[in-house]
Image: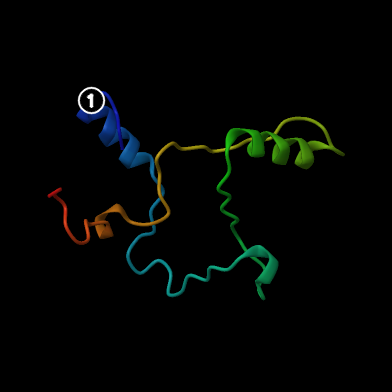
Amino acid sequence: MYTETKAAGQRSEAAVDKFAPGEYATLLVAPLDRTTFEPHLVCIYANPAQVMRLTQAALWKRGGQAHLRLRAAASTAPRSSSRPCGRTSRR
């Protein structure tokens, strides 16, 4: 994560939700329009305008406010698996 200090980065990393080893045996992932199971969690990738429209839609009938947990630069893929492929220098 990009932060001003190492301590701020450590706090951000500590706040990222993680599964404990052995906590789950299986993880099912599928597009919502093609899933054959009832999801327990929905992960949405959106820009700010899309998030605003989704929030408005969710509150259309009941009103009130929505409680969201947002995190910048948190990834759904482990960063430890990212590595450069091929040539890393220019000719």
Q: Position of residue 8 (x, y in %)?
A: 28, 28
Q: Quadrant of residue 30?
A: bottom right
Vertically, is 53 above or below 38?
above
Give the percent coordinates (x, y) of residue 19. 39, 59
Q: Residue furthest right?
A: 61
Which corner quadrant of the image does residue 22 belong to? bottom left
Q: Quadrant of the N terminus?
A: top left
**Residue at horizontal 43 percent and vertical 54 percent from the top:** 76
Secondary structure beneath disc 1?
A: loop
Is residue 19 rendered to the left or right of residue 68?
Answer: left
Which of these two is toward me, 83 or 4? 83
Please tell me which residue is depicted at 82% across the width and 32% down the height of the picture.
Answer: 63
On screen, residue 68 versus residue 52, left or right, reads left
* Residue in the picture at 68% in, 33% down: 52
* Kind of residue indicated by mark 1: Thr
How many other residues sit within 10 Å of disc 1, few (<14), some (14-19) or many (≥20)?
few
Question: In the orientation shown, which residue stands out farthest toward the front?
Answer: 91
For the residue pair 34 and 63, the one nearer the viewer reads as 34
Q: Position of residue 23 (x, y in %)?
A: 40, 66
Q: Which residue is mark 1?
A: 5
Pinpoint residue 79: horizontal percent, then vertical percent: 29, 53
Question: Count of labels shown?
Answer: 1
Observer-nearest residue: 63 or 80?
80
